[in-house]
Image (cartoon, rainbow, N blue to C red):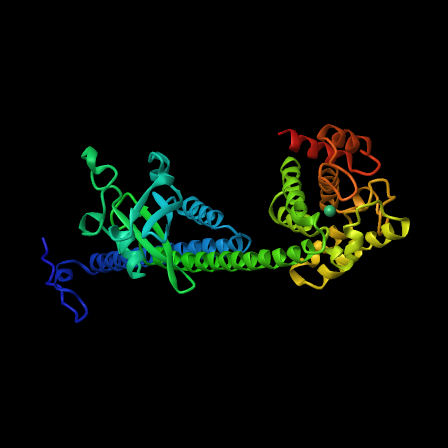
Amino acid sequence: MSISPPAVRGKEESPDEGDFDPLTRAATRANHDATTETVIAAESLAHREARLARATAAARRLEVASRLAVRLTELRDPQEIAQTVVCELHSAFGYYLAVIHRLDGDGILRVLDGAGRLAERAANFLAWEQPADSGVNGRVARTGVLALVDDTALDPDYVGSHAREAGARRDPGSELAVPIHVDGRVWGVLNLEQEETHSFDEYDVMLAEAVVAQTGAALHRCLLVDEMEQSFSRTLGVLCDALESKDTYTADHAEEVSTLALATAAQLRINGRQHRDLRYAALLHDIGKIGVRSELLNKPSSLTPEEYLEIQTHSEIGSTLLERIPMLAEIAPMVRGVHERWDGNGYPDRLAGSEIPIESRIVAICDAWHAMTSDRPYRKAMSQADARAELTRCSGTQFDPDVLLAFLSSIDA
Ligand SMILES: [Fe+2]
């Protein structure tokens, strides 16, 4: 039996390796290196995966923010804006609750709209309200500073949990509340909630800040449009007053025709921008009479053919006036077309059928109805039954038959 000489330990060898033959040592070293490489590779993979997950999360939030930005530019109503924001956030990220509170003048935060499981299961969710002097949302509304609450149990301002009374754990566990600024003031609060604690990260904060900036801009646009519409309505009022001072008949006529036209529009399912245009067209359909002699407008006897021709110029005068007002230029053809006839024998352009703007066809019927059922300088008011019979007689010649049916349904409703 021979005894092997002790191995000579090289500089690069580890003490443990000295007990093995060179082949074993090489294998051990290779194995060690491979393990190290595997660990490094695993760490690198985990790192890459984490980076990818973060990038994906950021991209997802960016995508939602940019989609919302596009959708919000089309909206003109705060309720629609709130609904769009919370539904988009909830469907993209499955928040337990996404809600927009509006801060009202009486210092109360009221729910404008909300989405998520908490909103679905809460009774009468839309009626929720809370004073701005309490709660996390109240703090945000008062200070205008965002609140990221990792654990609602640890926030002294957190007001009541909906499940606490039942003895359940704190529900929700975390929340993110961000102020919505409009024209430099806190308008309300976007509140996101999750069941678990520590659910929100810096990407949620970035998303929420981007969303409230877009929401605030959209709400500001609503406010400006509202102000413009109000000042516009006042301007219309002045114009109508000017006409009324010339023509006693128009005192209530424009308002009455407008009311009848909007009732007809409801039957025809006309809404949105077209509804607004119809209202203005109805209010202004006689505005051209400003350019017609008062003695003709108030003449107690029948008009001569020449006088009738002169009265007819009010359609063109009215549309020419409106064309010069940028906000009313689109109404001009509607006003011009009110005295056109369905059979093409009207004035001033002898348009026929669907060539005549639908708004003009609606106003034409309402105008005729109100004229027939009102006292005029030269005759007493007709009964509603007679006026109805007269309109029906003119269906398909003077009036659009479908619009006439809608009108008759509206006065029967
Ligand atoms: Fe009229």
The residue closer to the viewer here, 45 or 413, is 413
The image quarter containing residue 375 is top right
The residue closer to the viewer here, 223 or 84, is 223
Is residue 54 visible to us here?
no
- Residue 165 screen position, x and y as percent: 20, 35
- Residue 274 screen position, x and y as percent: 65, 47
309 displayed left or right of 153: right
The residue closer to the viewer here, 207 or 354, is 354
- 180 is higher (above) or lower (below) than 346: below
- Residue 164 screen position, x and y as percent: 20, 38
The residue closer to the viewer here, 379 or 53, is 379
The residue shown at (28%, 56%) is 148
The image quarter containing residue 16 is bottom left
The residue shown at (31%, 59%) is 146
The residue shown at (26%, 48%) is 174
191 displayed left or right of 376: left
The residue shown at (49%, 57%) is 223
